Image: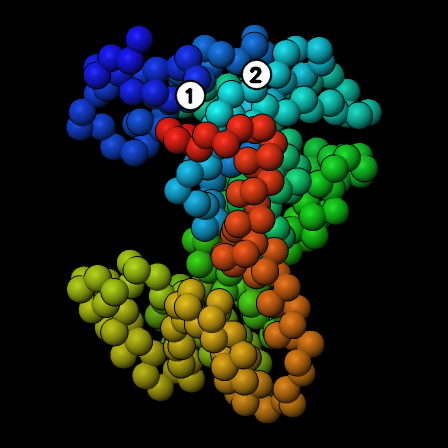
Amino acid sequence: MRLTAFRRVSHGLYLRRSHGLGNEEEFLRELRAWVQVLPPGAVFTHLTAARLRGWRLPAVPEQVPVFAAVRGTERRPRRPGLICSRLVARGLGPPDPIELRRGLPVDSAEEIVLRAARDLGVLDLVIMIDSALEAGDLDHERMQAVLASGRPGVRVARTAYELATPRCESAGETVLRLFHQQMEVDVEPQVELYDAAGTFIGRVDLLVPAIGAVHEYDGAGHRGQVQHRNDLRRERGWSGTGYHRRGFVLDDLLNHAAVVMHELDRALARPHDARRIARWRRLVANSLYDERGRERILNRWQRAMGFDDWSRTT
């Protein structure tokens, strides 16, 4: 029976309508509903678990399925909006005790990374791993064991893990840092700057030591009136210190990457190399930041669910 007091989450799964709740509260309500159709011992994984752990996420589409995992011979539910995997750890010992985040069962951090690596590109995965490292969720020895397991997703996970650092504080900073790495420009993330007298003058996203430049990601938060005033005041305080700041937005890195590459080459007084921009474009093309890459991943998720109904997915 379809009652106006309830809304559909998936086939046979409904929630009583509740007004005035934010997106995050509704997200948690839906996951608690999904627990009712998952077998005992099931955990959330992939992007779902990463969000529960509070990790930063890449450019995730509005409609993303819920990701869960079962072990052993437990049944795998198949419903619209749910992708349930059977993860079998080879040679990694018995499964860890189930960890709860926000009252919901989540997979281990290392397994979350590996499961996401089966779908996402290196650029997407580095954003998640940067955040996981900053939060202290990833254990290096356990991660190395996962990367040596030969399981699906290991190659992408290994590449992303080698590029990751705990010293980034936003997804935009990670994208900016990876762009510089693909351009073969050495940078130091999250550096504290001091003037000649030893006075602290600011903490910056990226320092380019070769030219004494500060490169920072200017997201939407930097356009606010208060933040904009603070940014200008900070830059004025650098007068005479030898540091100069340049801000970048996502559009620069995704749609005008060749222009930015030429600007870096001129600043470093080096010849252009088209292979650098080709590497960066491949990285973007295989990520959620590219329209075709996003469509490819969404189609893969839709095939994995085996359903055409995307309505009311989380």
* Residue labelled with disc 1: 10
Camera-side residue of 196 and 154 = 154
Q: Quadrant of the C terminus?
A: top left
Q: Earlier in the sequence, mark 1 or mark 2?
A: 1
Residue 20 vertical position relative to residue 121 in the rendered view, above or below: above
**Percent x, y of residue 13:** 40, 14
Residue 309 visible in rendering:
yes
Q: Which amino acid type is shown beneath numbered disc 1?
A: Ser
**Percent x, y of residue 304:** 61, 32
Q: Residue at x 35, y 70 (%)?
A: 201
**Percent x, y of residue 161:** 66, 48
Residue 304 vertical position relative to residue 122 in the rendered view, above or below: above
**Percent x, y of residue 6:** 26, 16
Q: Residue at x 35, y 15 (%)?
A: 14
Residue 294 vertical position relative to residue 242 in the rendered view, above or below: above
- Residue 312 is drawn in which quadrant? top left
* Residue labelled with disc 2: 77
**Tag 1 near tag 2, CB within 8 Å:** no
Side of 175 where 181 appears, left or right: right
Q: Which amino acid type is shown beneath numbered disc 2?
A: Pro
Q: Quadrant of the N terminus?
A: top left
Task: Find the distance from the CA under tag 1 to the CA under tag 2.
Answer: 12 Å
